[in-house]
Amino acid sequence: MDGKALAARIRREVAADVAELGELALATILVGDDAASKIYIRLKHNAAREVGIEPIDRRLPADVSEAEVIAAVDELNGDDSVDGVLVQLPLPADLDEARAIAAIEPVKDVDGIHPLNAGLLYLGRPTLVGATPVGVLALLDEYDVPLEGANAVVVGRSDIVGKPVAHLLLERNATVTICHSRTRDLPALTRAADVLVVAVGRDRMVKPDWIKPGAAVVDVGMNRSEEGLFGDVDPAGMEVAGAMTPVPGGVGPMTIAMLLRNTVQAARFRRGSLAFPRA
Ligand code: NAP
């Protein structure tokens, strides 16, 4: 499943949407100087610029107070020219991520992690949902993977990937099993999966014989080592799976493309062409 190609198409569609909607802006807040976060911010800004969305770059020093982070979020919440607000995670350890996220105006929450948006997803009313999970579903749809009634196994239960992916699959009438670090006999569960989504962060953990022949496998993992960048699934799994995402070139490019699409969606909510649920 070629995420690079699909992401390129989505970016073209987003560019057309932006041209129709007029000026759009995506604001990011980066606290401290985590090297990986700086790279992600640069990628997001470049991608935004390419489709005609203005990137707004707010940077705060690592020793900033929680009140100052929330003040920065509030300022962007109140700025009518800003469509999306994103706090780059992780925050430095002494800052409370949950409170910073809760400060984001839900209709501008392009990462879909504000409790209102997460709760709406849980209630089966997906509104703004994180870019990685919607990217996973977009890939499965692009390759016509049947979801209704399928056995879907999600390995990983993080708030940003595993849980939202599981809810989106449930929404599509898959029978969903969520696995995590305490799951007993994980290979037996993954082997039963028609659709397997792995978001763990362990280099090539899922072996080819953990995969049901013909299954659709989405590998969210990004593990950097001296050998290079690898996913959570052994690339030899491609020979067993019916369809599988590569790393790189699978979910990674989809995440950026879907963030841009979420920014368009947030703009439509605020401009009234889509109704944003209040509760
Ligand atoms: P996370 O917050 O660290 O969560 C990892 C999950 O994996 C946890 O639920 C954990 O279980 C589970 N886990 C850990 N070891 C396990 C094991 N041996 N067997 C089964 N489950 C195990 O990670 P995340 O943020 O979801 O990210 C997961 C991976 O996706 C990382 O490699 C990350 O870099 C990558 N990622 C990629 C993108 C992209 O755009 N491609 C976006 C986001 C994340 P417990 O809950 O029990 O601890």
Image (tube, rainbow, N blue to C red):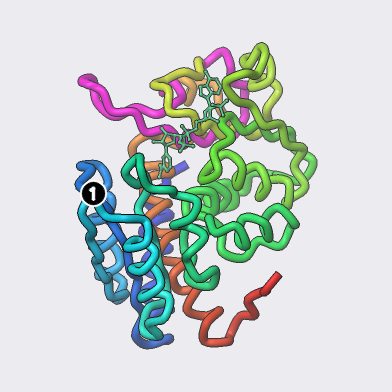
Side of 56 where 209 appears, left or right:
right
Tell which of 70 and 216 is nearer to you: 70
Residue 13 visible in this rendered orientation of the protein = no
Residue 57 visible in image:
yes
Find out whether residue 233 is within the magenta segment. Answer: yes
Where is residue 216 shown, x and y percent of the image? 59, 34
Residue at point 68% right, 60% down?
120
- Residue 177 belongs to magenta span: no
Q: Nearer the viewer, residue 260 or 8?
A: 260
**Identity, as a three-letter code, of the amino acid under mark 1:** Ala
Which residues, given as a range, are shown in magenta? 208-235
Q: Determine which residue is flagged by label 1.
A: 62
- Residue drawn 65% across the image and 42% down it: 166
Write down the quadrant of residue 263 in the picture.
bottom left
Q: Residue 80's spot in the image, x, y percent?
A: 40, 85
Q: Which percent across, then down, holds residue 5?
A: 38, 52
Secondary structure of residue under mark 1: loop
**Which residue is nearer to you in this view: 136 or 156?**
156
Density class for disc 1 (Cα within 10 Å; few <14, some 14-19, many ≥20) is some
Residue occupying image coordinates x 39% and y 79%: 18
